[in-house]
Image: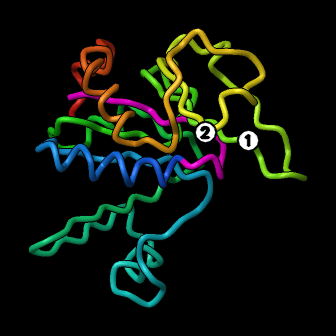
């Protein structure tokens, strides 16, 4: 499987880009999964629903399944940063896993950078210091603080980004770290 992290600040366009990339890869016959990093508490269920009630009652895990969908909610006993490799190990075999967030993960990345709106804080780039960033997707390359040594991709051309990903697919091949090989998937 191929794994690529789309890293960038909130509001840079990662989710919108991923929606388009998913559809384009699927149209090419590729199976795609997404691993999304959330920075705060979130719910996939609504208060009052059975699975929410089970979790509120103290269940460690709640697995909800139907003939069309499966969702697993796990409550951690203490706050900890999720391990991207352990999460990848839980996914089914697919052609591509697109990771949104996990910008510090030791995985190949495309940095998504959009100039902040006036009055918003600065959005520093990571391509200058992170050797795992293989390309920079932006809509304003002239506004980057320094020209990247990595290829520049047009943030408004998801088809071009997908073509670049497929052309360089070997750079995104994922192998579970050796230290995790013996752990259950």
- The percent position of residue 145, horizontal first and vertical second, equals 78, 22
Query: Split into 4 quadrants, where in the image is the N terminus?
Result: top left
Asked if the magenta segment contains residue 92, the reply would be no
Q: Name the quadrant of the C terminus.
A: top left
Which of the 4 image quarters holds residue 62? bottom left
In this picture, residue 119 sits left or right of residue 38: right
Which corner quadrant of the image does residue 161 belong to?
Answer: top left
Residue at the spot of label 2: 139
Q: Secondary structure at mark 1?
A: loop
Q: Marks 2 and 1: which is nearer the front?
A: 2
Residue at image location 38% in from the left, 30% down from the top: 4
The answer to whether marks 2 and 1 mark residues whose Cβ atoms lie closer than 8 Å is yes
Spot occupied by residue 93 in the image (x, y as percentages of width and height)? 14, 38
Q: CA distance from mark 2 to mark 1?
A: 8 Å
Near-viewer residue (32 or 73): 32
Q: Name the residue at 65% across, 52% down.
A: 11
In the image, what residue occupies the spot 51% across and 34% down?
154
Give the residue at x 61% y 51%: 39
Q: Earlier in the sequence, mark 2 or mark 1?
A: 1
Q: Which mark is residue 28?
A: none
Extreme right residue here? 119
Residue bearing mark 1: 115
Q: Is residue 161 above or below residue 31?
A: above
Pick the residue in front: 123 or 139.
139
- Is 12 a magenta residue? yes
Front-most of residues 165 and 10: 165
**Left or right of residue 116: residue 34:** left
Span shown in magenta: 1-13
Point out residue 2 in the picture as x, y percentages from the top left corner. Answer: 26, 28
């Amino acid at each position: 499987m191929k794994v690529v992290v789309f890293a960038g600040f909130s509001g840079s366009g990662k989710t919108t880009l991923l929606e388009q990339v998913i559809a384009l890869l699927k149209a090419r016959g590729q199976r795609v999964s997404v691993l999304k990093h959330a920075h705060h508490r979130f719910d996939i269920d609504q208060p009052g629903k059975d699975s929410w009630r089970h979790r509120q009652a103290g269940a460690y895990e709640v697995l909800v399944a139907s003939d069309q969908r499966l969702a697993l909610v796990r409550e951690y006993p203490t706050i900890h940063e999720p391990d991207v490799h352990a999460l990848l190990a839980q996914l089914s075999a697919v052609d591509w896993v697109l990771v949104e967030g996990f910008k510090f993960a030791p995985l190949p990345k495309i940095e998504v950078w959009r100039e902040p709106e006036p009055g918003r804080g600065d959005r520093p780039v990571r391509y200058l210091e992170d050797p795992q960033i293989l390309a920079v997707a932006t809509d304003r390359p002239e506004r980057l603080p320094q020209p990247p040594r990595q290829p520049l991709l047009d943030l408004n051309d998801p088809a071009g980004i997908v073509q670049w990903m497929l052309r360089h697919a070997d750079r995104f091949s994922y192998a579970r770290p050796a230290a995790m090989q013996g752990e259950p998937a």
